[in-house]
Amino acid sequence: MSATRSPARLWRRSLQFRVVASTLVLSVIVIGLTGWALVRSVADGLAEGRRDVAVAEARAGFEATQVQLDAAVETQDGAQSQTLAEMVDELSTTGSETRPYDLVLEGPLVSGAGVAAPVRSSVAFDATTVPEPLRVSVRDDGGVFWSYSTARSPGTDESAPAVVVGGRLDVPSTGDAYALYYVFSMAEQQSTLDLVLRALLLGGMAMVLLVAAVAWIVSRQVVNPVRLARRIAERYAAGNLEQRMHVRGEDDIARLSTSFNQMAASLQSQIRRLENLSRLQQRFVSDVSHELRTPLTTVRMAGEVLHRSRDRFDPATARAAELLTAEIERFEELLSDLLDLSRFDAGAAQLELDAVDLSQVARDATQDPVVRAAGLPVELEGTDVPVVVDADIRRVDRIMRNLVANAVKYSRTDRLLVRVGENDGCASIAVRDFGIGLRGDETQRVFDRFWRADPARTQGGTGLGLPISREDAALHGGTLRVWSRPGEGTEFVLTLPRPGGSVHPPAIVSELA
Amino acid sequence: MSYRRRSNPDRVLVVDDDAALAEMLTIVLEGEGLVTEVCSSGDRVLERFVEFKPDIVLLDLMLPGLDGMSVCRQIRERSGVPIVMLTAKAETTDVVQGLEAGADDYITKPFKSSELVARIRARLRRTDRLAEPLVFGDIVLDPAAHTVTRAGQPLDLTPLEFDLLACLLGTPEQVFSREVLLERVWGYHHPGDTKLVNVHMTRLRSKIEDDADDPRVIRTVRGIGYQAVLPGAGPV
């Protein structure tokens, strides 16, 4: 699992991760927005406070200067600016330690003459310190104007937020006008704001982490019982129904646990009931087995005694003795097949696994008494190497006996092909005849109990051979499948899995498929 | 324990509660020249056994009164006489329980009379191949006297266990598959039915080995069968 896919996987798989992650994201958004609004209002408050003070102070300054200017009657052109510069110098120098502002004097302002260079400023300022709109307002209208700005020293990168208050000074004697700007630094407010911002950031981060931790703890409280329930459910699924959830309190979790336990108890009782039924069924099968087998043994032995003495009977009685023996044989087969099927149905059939060589099984099939009696040539394919698989040899032999007998009996065939094959997951053995074959609907029915391809040919066989063979195959976790084409013959393929292997794909695929 | 070899007809004690089957068995077995006696209740088997002195016991596992397993154990406590179980249950566990209770062989109903007679004959046939006593480490097997001693101490083996041991010791180091042992000792071939051998091998080992869990005389060859290991042939 790569690192990039891992969170996505966690998101998909962990409820707790999802809860914590979404809580984290949402709390970051909410706290971020709140923090931003808070900072904004603090910043505004600080700036407004500073501005009000600045404007009041500047207004006082303007009035004082104007009064001073009105009093100083100069006639010489250059002397006005000289006087103003001196005033600025005076304002700048007096109490320079406590003075909370700097001054910029510009002028004389000539209408339409554009921006005049500063005649004097208490500290060196970049021209952009006084914003252009302010400059225009001061020049064109009388009165006091203010604007926020950034105080920059020329040639350096140093800058500080500031509020600039500007006013026009009229010199009555000459009619000239000058612009005087008060530049109030807001560095102090900025640092206060920075402090608030840092505190808010830290607080916000702590808050987010705290919320995440709370979400983690709370979701754990919910998720832990769910996980416990999941683990217990998995154990139920694995067949262990003894587990119960611990019920504590009366909350939803406790009710979930209670319902869970009730479900388990109900399942358990259902299973017990079924187990009891199955046990009864097995017991019944066993009893029937005993009860039927003892008289059958007597009848059989009696039949044999009669059969041995049939030479001494008249022909009808002799034939009766023969029929008796043959039918006892058939009855016994039927009983034995029925008991086997009951065992499968009751789930009582057990495997005795051993290493079985299917090649050997195929070779043995050529020696089958039914095949020998029919005088059929049996062709073998793939039997030159051992094909070993874990199987119950008696069941595999029984399947082969059934398949071979079936091929000989119903297919009116003149040859038989037995093939063996294997792959990593399974091993297969196939019995193919080249007889009349089955119709499509007949291949569906060959594994039905008591079904016969030709109802007229009921002689011999119980009609249970193929159903039992299929149960035998299924008991191994394997398959028994049939393919047939009218006129081309029929092929049965038995596929048995290797330990941990799969029967898909089978090691042999029929040519008739 | 004693085992008599007699020239007069072999005697079969039939223990079966089903009167019809018991009578039929009598007809078939007497037709084969055997002398039979029927006992229909588990409680009276021992009594009959002592009176009749059978050469072989045919025992139905399902009996009223004392059940077949217990009867089997009681007989085995007194005698090594061959016991063949008649069982209607083909389930492995029942068969193994019967064998562990001391039965030598079993036959599942419904059987053919020929099959039954073959089993009985096989159990009555003695191992006469060996004349000379076999000395195998501290184990001495005397076929004539039908006794086995270990370090001078007589071992209490049933005739079947005796035959099994004689078969393995007769050709030491040879590995006998369970199928071969079935054929040689039990006298018939029944492929796949190896529990007979397994159960009796366990019983034999518990009698001749110092530690049945770590056998030194008869070794199991995994996946193949058993072999008698010559003493001093090295660690197993």
Image: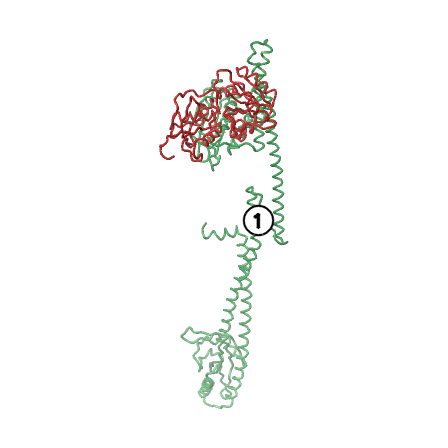
Chain colours: A green, B red
What count of labels does the image hold?
1
Q: Nearer the viewer, residue A148 or A210?
A: A210
Q: Looking at the image, which residue sits at the far right?
A: A250
Q: Nearer the viewer, residue A118 or A88?
A: A88
- Is residue A511 something that shows in the picture? no
Quadrant of the image occupied by residue A463: top right
Residue A427: percent from left, percent from top? 46, 32
Q: Nearer the viewer, residue B57 or A297?
A: B57
Pick the quarter of the image with the C terminus of chain B: top left
Q: Is residue A9 above or below residue B5?
A: below
Q: Find disc 1 in the rendering and name its residue.
A: A229
Q: Is residue A504 above or below residue A124?
A: above
Q: Looking at the image, which residue sits at the far front?
A: B152
Label 1: which secondary element: helix
Q: Chain of mark 1?
A: A
Q: Residues within 10 Å of mark 1 (few under 14, many from 20)?
A: many
Quadrant of the image occupied by residue A420: top left
Residue A509: percent from left, percent from top? 47, 30
Residue at the spot 58% in from the left edge and 44% down from the top edge:
A242
Q: Is residue A138 above or below residue A288?
A: below
Q: Nearer the viewer, residue B222 or A68?
A: B222
Q: Is residue B144 left or right of residue B73?
A: left
Residue B233: percent from left, percent from top? 35, 32
Amino acid carrying label 1: it is: Ala
Q: Is residue B71 left or right of residue A497?
A: right
Residue A122: percent from left, percent from top? 44, 82
- Is residue A431 something that shows in the picture? yes
